[in-house]
């Protein structure tokens, strides 16, 4: 009898934890929820550094990757997208992680067949892009996880889609998988104006970070800098460096 009573209870506890974790993702958009906070100011500072990272070329499209997973990359991409949109730029956040999409957790209202749908000719670009409740900010979710993400991202179709998006939007931010694990970021980095490596100070080793930079350069990336994320500092440890 005790055992049968405990099972539903444990199940409820697990379900409530799952709901709590899921519901907190949008709450981590500090640039939206607390635009005057020191945390938001850090993201605006990174935005400024990106804008002034090149004298001769406008950094209209940015790719962000990391050397390892669990680096906080997707949240940083999302908050950067918010501060660019707050600047009045028509901004598009693209979930380029077709293996383990995360952007949909941060923007649960962004529902479409996404990037995969475009690349497989199931929907048009217009049909795939989702509005958000933030002015000037749009999201292109990953869509259904395909069996061949690398082939899709390295295709001619991807180049055509990127070129069209580049004409439509003032700012594009690509959230891509960790470059040490898969080749996807290497396939995309040659398309964009600039690439950034995210380093988690308490997680990323110096050796892995160097290897990640080498892979970006092998992919003909224009590496404009790194973002250092100290997660122990709870959003207080973001800073940008060349």
Image: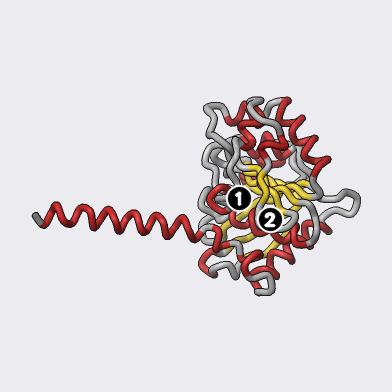
Tag 2 secondary structure: strand
| Percent coordinates x, y for residue 27 in the rendering | 55, 63
Residue 107, numbered circle = none
Which quadrant would residue 214 be assigned to in this image?
A: top right
Question: Can residue 208 be seen?
Answer: no
Instruction: Return the residue nearer the eye: 105 or 200.
Output: 105
* N-terminal-most mark, 2 or 1: 1
Look at the image and tell me in which quarter the C terminus lies: bottom right
Residue 99: x and y in percent read: 53, 37
Say which residue appears at 88% left-offset and 49% top-offset.
57
Residue occupying image coordinates x 75% and y 36%: 162
Count up the numbered dots. Answer: 2
Q: Nearer the viewer, residue 220 or 101?
A: 101
Name the residue tied to disc 2: 226
Quadrant (top left/top right/bottom left/bottom right) for the N terminus: bottom left
Residue linked to disc 1: 209
């Amino acid at each position: 009898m005790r055992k049968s009573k405990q099972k539903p209870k444990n199940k409820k506890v697990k379900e409530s934890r799952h709901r709590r974790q899921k519901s907190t993702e949008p709450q981590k958009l500090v640039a939206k929820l607390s635009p005057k906070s020191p945390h938001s100011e850090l993201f605006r500072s990174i935005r400024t550094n990106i804008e002034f990272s090149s004298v001769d070329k406008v950094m209209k499209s940015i790719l962000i990757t990391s050397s390892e997973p669990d680096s906080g990359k997707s949240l940083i991409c999302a908050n950067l997208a918010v501060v660019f949109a707050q600047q009045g730029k028509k901004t598009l956040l693209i979930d380029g992680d077709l293996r383990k999409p995360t952007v949909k957790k941060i923007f649960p209202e962004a529902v479409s067949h996404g990037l995969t749908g475009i690349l497989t000719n199931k929907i048009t670009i217009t049909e795939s892009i989702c509005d958000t409740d933030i002015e000037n900010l749009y999201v292109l979710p990953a869509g259904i996880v395909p069996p061949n993400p690398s082939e899709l991202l390295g295709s001619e179709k991807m180049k055509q889609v990127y070129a069209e998006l580049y004409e439509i939007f003032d700012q594009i931010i690509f959230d891509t998988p960790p470059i040490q694990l898969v080749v996807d970021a290497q396939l995309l980095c040659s398309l964009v104006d600039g690439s950034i490596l995210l380093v988690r100070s308490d997680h990323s080793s110096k050796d892995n970070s160097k290897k990640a930079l080498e892979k970006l350069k092998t992919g003909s990336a224009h590496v404009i800098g790194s973002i250092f994320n100290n997660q122990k500092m709870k959003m207080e440890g973001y800073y940008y460096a060349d």
